[in-house]
Image (spheres, rainbow, N blue to C red):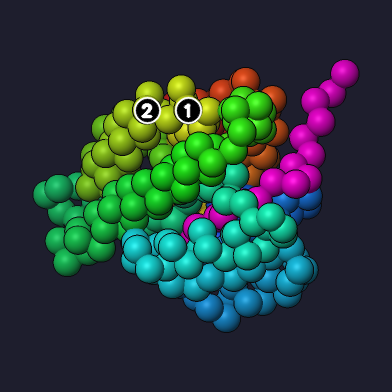
């Protein structure tokens, strides 16, 4: 019998939702019945997406994902759309991030601080705020209503270059190595309390990511010719929905997803 991947009743927050993997995750979660609070810097794009998906079940909170005030606004918005009595988000997808072409020797040093701030500090602040709210929500409930009574998930997007050192993107990879370590440490803290913390590590996914990171289009075309077809954002989105749809006692905690022909990284 096929697993039911419905997410009806789930209350999600997705960062970096305006494009690429975050956009695909948002669409997939809503299609499976979840309510979503979506975040990205591009306010007009978020507003259009909320209208497309249905304003009643989707709330847009634009802004910088590494700003504590924006993070609080996202989580507050989830409570506002949760109904009565209000409850905290139970599915937080920490997806916002950006790439950077090059190594420690030849990448653009002017971009280092922003990449570190977005990929590491932003992820850490979002993880901390979401986890603390979930823990408080669990503690406030009667023992019979606590974990594993219903699933609570935090899903963090890592990368295969956070597992295997890659000379063509080692500064970006360094941020993902940091994220991977942070997620595993937090998993050991949060799992006993009933919160599932999952790391998803995609390989090559074709999206706006390559252009923003500054990769040479001719280089990426060669990569696609060698290992393609590469992943598309919906491939990662289906995986996130599968993770979130598991029974509360089942935790898929670390997943690498690559194109079939990708050998490295």
Nearer the observer, 128 or 39: 128
Q: In the rendered image, is residue 26 in sight?
A: no
Q: Is residue 120 above or below residue 3?
A: below
Dot 1: within a 10 Å radius of its alpha carbon, few (fewer than 14), some, or many (20 or more) residues?
some
Tag count:
2
Q: Are marks 1 and 2 in contact (CB under 8 Å)?
A: yes
* Magenta region, residue range: 1-16
User: Which residue is pictured at 31% across the width and 36% down the height?
Assistant: 182
Q: Is residue 11 left or right of residue 53?
A: left
Dominant secondary structure of the residues highlighted in magenta in the image = loop
Q: On the image, numbered disc 2 is attached to which residue?
A: 189
Query: Residue at the left extreme?
Result: 105
Query: Residue at the bottom extreme?
Result: 44
Looking at the rendered structure, the secondary structure element under dot 1 is: helix
User: Which residue is pictured at 78% across the width and 50% down the height?
Assistant: 33
Nearer the observer, 263 or 199: 199
Q: CA distance from mark 1 to mark 2?
A: 8 Å
Q: In the rendered image, is residue 57 in sight?
A: yes
User: Which residue is pictured at 74% across the width and 63% down the height?
Assistant: 57
Looking at the rendered structure, the secondary structure element under dot 2 is: helix
The picture places residue 257, in percent across and down from the top left corner, at 53, 31
The picture places residue 81, in percent across and down from the top left corner, at 67, 63
The picture places residue 44, in percent across and down from the top left corner, at 57, 81
Q: On the image, numbered disc 1 is attached to which residue?
A: 193
Q: Is residue 12 magenta?
A: yes
The picture places residue 202, in percent across and down from the top left corner, at 49, 38
Quadrant in which the N terminus is drawn: top right
As drawn, the label of residue 137 is none
Q: Is residue 151 left or right of residue 129?
A: right
User: Which residue is pictured at 81% across the width and 31% down the height?
Assistant: 4
Nearer the observer, 226 or 92: 92
């Amino acid at each position: 019998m096929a697993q039911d991947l419905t997410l009806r009743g789930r209350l999600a927050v997705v960062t970096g939702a305006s494009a690429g993997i975050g956009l695909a995750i948002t669409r997939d979660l809503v299609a499976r019945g979840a309510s979503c609070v979506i975040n990205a810097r591009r306010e007009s794009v978020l507003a259009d997406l909320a209208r497309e998906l249905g304003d009643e079940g989707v709330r847009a909170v634009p802004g910088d994902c590494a700003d504590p005030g924006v993070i609080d606004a996202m989580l507050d918005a989830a409570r506002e759309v949760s109904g009565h009595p209000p409850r905290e988000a139970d599915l937080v997808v920490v997806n916002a991030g950006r790439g950077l072409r090059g190594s420690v020797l030849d990448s653009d040093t002017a971009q280092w601080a922003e990449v570190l701030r977005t990929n590491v500090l932003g992820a850490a602040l979002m993880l901390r705020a979401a986890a603390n709210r979930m823990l408080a929500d669990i503690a406030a409930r009667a023992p019979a209503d606590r974990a594993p009574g219903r699933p609570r998930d935090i899903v963090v997007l890592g990368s295969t270059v956070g597992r295997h050192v890659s000379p063509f993107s080692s500064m970006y990879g360094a941020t993902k190595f940091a994220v991977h370590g942070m997620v595993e440490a937090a998993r050991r803290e949060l799992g006993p309390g009933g919160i599932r913390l999952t790391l998803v590590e995609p390989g090559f996914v074709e999206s706006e990511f390559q252009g923003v990171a500054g990769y040479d289009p001719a280089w990426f075309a060669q990569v696609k010719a060698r290992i393609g077809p590469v992943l598309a954002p919906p491939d990662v989105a289906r995986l996130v929905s599968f993770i979130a749809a598991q029974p509360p006692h089942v935790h898929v905690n670390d997943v690498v997803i690559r194109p079939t022909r990708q050998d490295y990284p």
